[in-house]
Image (tube, rainbow, N blue to C red):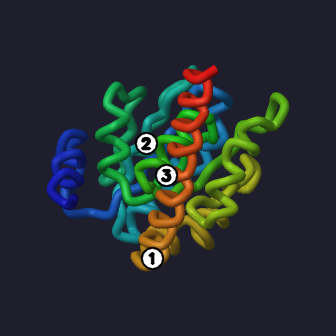
Amino acid sequence: GPERRAAARAHFGLDPARRTLLVTGGSLGARAINRGISGSAAEIVASGAQVLHVWGGLTELEDPGVSGYTVIPYCDRMDLAFTACDLAVSRAGSTTVSELAGLGIPAVLVPYGHGNGEQRLNAAGVVRAGGALLVRDEELTPEWVGRVLIPLLGDDARLAEMADRARSVGALDGTERLYALVREALV
């Protein structure tokens, strides 16, 4: 509830009452997410939101130096980071997608562009359900942040609907996994 969210924000030194965007670069080709979002730090904060940016990866940490935009190299309490946020921007690894959907967190999923496209597949269910947006690395421009991300972050009704839709897929996914475990146990 709201108390848990406020406490989670306080854990990271964030304003307990302020709309929060979580950005996680992750380790796989984090540069596009890191640069794409931090390059618009001032605009995002000016919209009234605050940002917790888990830089991740091996790329050198760059702090835009904007009050209300917190950059940390890594995070050993992702559970609190997820609780703290209203919207997440993240790579689309299978575990991350499952966690975000299961927790009902609206997301902007940015599949890692290399490899065999499995991250795009990981994201497909929750994107189809309307719980997340799928965005390519090269789309993460200041123009996109201004046109799509900032308006979404300020839209309570849309975030609430995305949360419900994400949760519905997360619940289905959990049930599916449970059945799979039971089937394995019975064989």
In the rendered image, is residue 127 in sight?
A: yes
**Identity of the residue furthest to the right in this view:** 116
Where is mark 2, residue-wise?
53
- Taking depth in this image into account, of 59 and 164 the one nearest to the observer is 164
The kind of residue on which mark 2 rests is His
Mark 1 surroundings within 10 Å by alpha-carbon count, few (fewer than 14), some (14 through 19), many (20 or more): few
Give the CA separation, mark 2 to mark 3: 27 Å
Q: Reply above or below: 164 against 115.
A: below
Where is mark 3, residue-wise?
171
Q: Nearer the viewer, mark 1 or mark 2?
A: 1
Where is mark 1, residue-wise?
155
The kind of residue on which mark 3 rests is Ala
Describe residue 160's horizontal placement relative to residue 125 as left or right: left
The spot of residue 82 in percent (x, y) is 37, 45
Q: Which residue is drawn at 46% across and 48% down?
A: 102
Give the CA separation, mark 1 to mark 2: 21 Å
Q: State if disc 1 and disc 3 touch (CB < 8 Å).
A: no
Give the CA separation, mark 3 to mark 1: 24 Å
Q: Residue at x 55, y 28 (%)?
A: 181
The spot of residue 73 in percent (x, y) is 42, 27
Describe residue 167's horizontal placement relative to residue 147 as left or right: left
Q: Residue at x 55, y 21 (%)?
A: 185
- Taking depth in this image into account, of 123 and 50 the one nearest to the observer is 123
Quarter of the view holding residue 68: bottom left
In the rendered image, is residue 66 in sight?
A: no
Describe residue 179's horizontal placement relative to residue 128 as left or right: left
Q: Reply above or below: 58 against 3.
A: above
Mark 2 surroundings within 10 Å by alpha-carbon count, few (fewer than 14), some (14 through 19), many (20 or more): many
